[in-house]
Image (cartoon, helix red, strand yellow):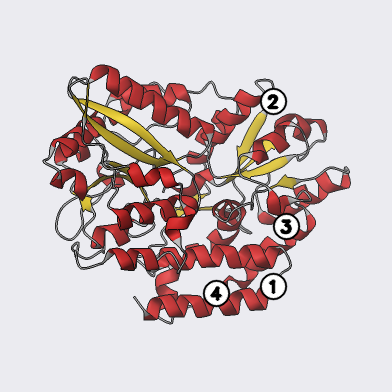
Amino acid sequence: MRNARARSSAKPARGLSRRSLMQSAGGLSIAAAVPLALAGCGTAGGTTGGKTAIRFLYATGDETWNSVAKAVADAFNAKSASAVVELDPLPAGTDYPTAMKTMDATGNWPALVDMRDTLTYLEAGKLAPIPESVSSLLNDEVYAPAEDGDVYIVPTTALNGELGFNMVYDKDYFEEHGLAVPTTYAEFIALLDAIQANGDAPLATAAGEIWPSDQLWKPLAAPTFAQYSEAGGFWNAVRAGDASIEDLREPLQRLKDITDTYVLEGWQSTQDAQTTTLLVNRQAVMSTSSAGIGRLNDVNKVDPDFNAGIFYVPADDGKLNVLKDDVNGDSASGFAISSQAKENGGKEYDAAVEFLEFYYSVDACNLMEETGMIAPNVKASDEIARNSTIPGAGDYFALLENPNLNFFQNPTAWAGFSTFHTFFRQARIEMQDGQTTIDECIAKSQEEFDNQAEHE
């Protein structure tokens, strides 16, 4: 699921250069990494049948999100008398923010952006304010103004925190072997042992590229991160010298133990989308996910007879420590309108606003639910028809009501964090794959963190 805190970012400063944005990708030759088709794209600002055409840039993800993006765009285009939304999907994961940086370097900004590295682009003056006609449709806790009083990002889906980072499992297998959803971390390990004792692979997880590596790591690290919630977040504590990456040794050890012992052989080359196939083909009894109900919907599309369920990995004390959604800072994600759209005469900006007003309407939210995604937190939520037909969806809704659910905050209000985070993900994968030790992972991650903070 997509990632409520008060915004601590500075008023947008237009002094951040395109070169600075390019460098924030870690020194990669970004232009070479992105399809050449981008070179011919502008904000689309022409007309289609007398309507203003705008591009909607988004990261392709699970099939449910891809279907939702198309269904809502099609419905808007059929309804609007003045605008046409043209879908501009790009690869998900780390390729997506890389492509965004390339677009910035070449001036090829779309009007609507499924935003990543939000604070970086906000401080660079790349985002236009989102008007009250849009934000007033949303619950107050799922968006927040910047220090200049304007709102620059609004959610694409329901903000239920990182509850989407969960385990999808084969319910029929559990019933056949007398297994139960774990209520403590010790029970989770015992569950993995029991499946392995049956001669089966307990878990499939994705690390074919770095972003899905969070799917197992985040629930394991959540109990540690939650300890710093009231103190302003773990990463801010590291930056202030009140904590260090050494404090993550225990969850890093747990991560390595699980991937060394219980994960389906060949996990390192597994792409995120392949875990659904591995689960449905019963090559593994469970798989990691970050798509929540969207992954359950994907499973159902592949095999309508597969009896899937989900659970969240519990802490030692049974708490379900779940990171709250970031509505501010660099880790915030959601819809943004590019400042380029506003500067190009205003028609593209007006079209983008019109689309967002439709996106948060009851009609569009019902369409999202029908397609298999939980709709955004709108004020008219009582009028939305929730979709409970997806097998396993009841498990997700039950998690939202679980008395052990503990939402915590881990804000990162500095633009250098996204670059460090990419590095840290890769360092964890190298550790899991045996290329480095835990000591080496901690040491080089701390060094990279300090370097990024020093140059902020």
Viewer-nearest residue: 295 or 270: 270
Query: Residue at left 55%, top 56%?
Result: 218
Rendered view: 140 above or below 419? above
Residue 187 visible (yes or no): no
Q: Earlier in the sequence, mark 3 or mark 1?
A: 3
Q: Quadrant of residue 236?
A: bottom left
Task: Inspect the image, locate mark 4, and give the three-letter code of the amino acid beneath it.
Answer: Ser
Q: Circle 3 is placed at which residue position?
A: 259
Q: Decide: marks 3, 2 in contact (CB < 8 A)?
A: no
Q: Earlier in the sequence, mark 3 or mark 2?
A: 3
Viewer-nearest residue: 251 or 61: 61
Query: Residue at left 29%, top 63%?
Result: 18
Q: Earlier in the sequence, mark 2 or mark 4?
A: 2
183 relative position to 139: left or right: right
Mark 3 packing: few (<14 Cα in 10 Å), some, or many (20+)?
some
Q: Nearer the viewer, mark 3 or mark 1?
A: 1
Mark 1 packing: few (<14 Cα in 10 Å), some, or many (20+)?
some
Rendered view: 87 above or below 410? above
Q: Earlier in the sequence, mark 3 or mark 4?
A: 3
Q: Circle 1 is placed at which residue position?
A: 436
Residue at far top of view: 78
Q: At which x and y percent is residue 78? A: 28, 17
Q: CA distance from mark 2 to mark 4?
A: 41 Å
Q: CA distance from mark 3 to mark 4?
A: 20 Å
Q: Quadrant of residue 44?
A: top left
Q: Circle 4 is placed at which residue position?
A: 445
